Image: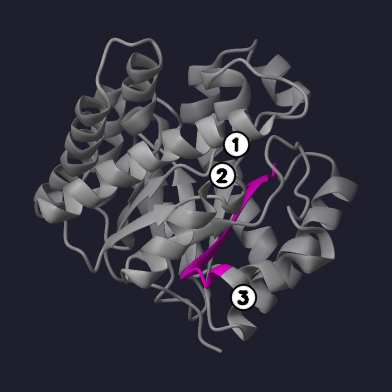
């Protein structure tokens, strides 16, 4: 099967789970039914913002959501019914090593919700623990193969955290790592995964400030006949100014087909709503405005 997805793709991701439990509401341990419902309601606010943005002009055929079934099952079903692009995470939230959220039943869960994309968030450093990388790679190949057998697309969210040795080498300088080391490590990770049979249709890539690095990432993602494989930019929870810079840089490179910017879109409005400083409708409109802005920046640069 020839893999790849090369149409414009503007994703609003809110599949965060531990971030909502601990970060937004400060909850730990097993959740009560009321707490689960509170998180589900906050995700409905984001979904309403997404739908408002589409009604105001974001191209419907390019607009999509990424949301989990734990807190967003009704959203996934509604979005599927309405014909939106839907993406569903496969990973357990907040784990250093990729593990299937639903264990051996993950394929059945995908069939229940029928997402357009199956998404895996993975921390993978090619200079890191080799045994860990091998374990993750085996699971990811199985996941991608299963998604393709079901007729779904496979989205791979690649995070490349610095190893202790790399961090020491750069004396803990995160900017130096981001600019000088991370891009080449990302390319190495993509090559290793491809060589092991992991074949995403879309790579979800951490923001790069250098256009040349974006070009090289696309070249690796599309090497050896993978010409239809697309790349999208993720937001990393950064401030809006930095996200706009990343969007402009990526949009100028053929092969970058869009973005998936989550927390920078919804976090501040949800905090304001939680604290009673913003009405629900204001939060919906704020989220829609931010999401629309990313799309406008990306489309204008393209």
- Write down the residue under mark 3: 111
In which quadrant of the rendered image does the N terminus lie? bottom right
x and y percentages locating residue 51 in the rendered image: 24, 51
User: At x 65% / y 57%, what residue is drawn?
Assistant: 90
User: At x 35% / y 31%, what residue is drawn?
Assistant: 266
Q: Mark 2 packing: few (<14 Cα in 10 Å), some, or many (20+)? A: many
x and y percentages locating residue 112 in the rendered image: 61, 71
Q: Is residue 285 visible?
A: yes
CB atoms of marks 1 and 2 within 8 Å: yes
Disc 1 and disc 2: Cα gap in Å? 8 Å
Disc 3 and disc 1: Cα gap in Å? 21 Å
The answer to whether 198 is drawn above or below residue 226 in the figure is: above
Which of 129/165 is in front?
129
Left/right placement of residue 190 relative to residue 138 reads: left
Left/right placement of residue 170 relative to residue 180 reads: right
Q: Mark 1 packing: few (<14 Cα in 10 Å), some, or many (20+)? A: some
User: At x 73% / y 28%, what residue is drawn?
Assistant: 163
- Write down the residue under mark 1: 17
Q: Which mark is residue 181?
A: none
């Amino acid at each position: 099967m020839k893999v790849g997805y090369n149409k414009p793709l503007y994703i609003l991701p809110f599949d965060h789970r531990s971030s909502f439990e601990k970060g937004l509401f400060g909850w730990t341990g097993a959740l009560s039914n009321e707490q689960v419902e509170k998180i589900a309601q906050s995700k409905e606010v984001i979904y309403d913002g997404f739908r408002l943005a589409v009604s105001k002009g974001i191209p419907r055929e390019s607009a999509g959501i990424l949301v989990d079934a734990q807190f967003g099952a009704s959203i996934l079903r509604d979005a599927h019914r309405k014909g939106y692009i839907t993406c569903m995470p496969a990973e357990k939230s907040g784990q250093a090593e990729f593990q299937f959220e639903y264990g051996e039943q993950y394929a059945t869960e995908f069939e229940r919700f029928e997402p357009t994309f199956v998404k895996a968030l993975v921390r993978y450093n090619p200079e890191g623990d080799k045994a860990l990388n091998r374990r993750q790679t085996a699971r990811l190949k199985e996941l991608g193969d299963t998604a393709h057998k079901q007729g779904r697309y496979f989205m791979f969210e690649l995070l490349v955290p610095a190893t202790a040795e790399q961090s020491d080498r750069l004396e803990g300088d995160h900017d130096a790592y981001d600019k000088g080391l991370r891009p080449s490590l990302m390319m190495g990770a993509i090559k290793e995964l491809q060589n092991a049979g992991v074949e995403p249709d879309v790579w979800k890539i951490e923001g790069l400030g250098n256009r040349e690095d974006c070009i090289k990432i696309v070249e690796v993602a599309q090497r050896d006949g993978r010409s239809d494989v697309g790349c999208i930019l993720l937001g990393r929870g950064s401030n809006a100014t930095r996200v706009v810079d990343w969007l402009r840089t990526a949009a100028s490179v053929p092969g970058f087909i869009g973005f998936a910017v989550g927390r920078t879109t919804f976090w501040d409005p949800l905090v304001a709503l939680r604290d009673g400083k913003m009405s629900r409708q204001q939060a919906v409109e704020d989220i829609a405005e931010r999401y629309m802005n990313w799309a406008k920046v990306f489309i204008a640069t393209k």
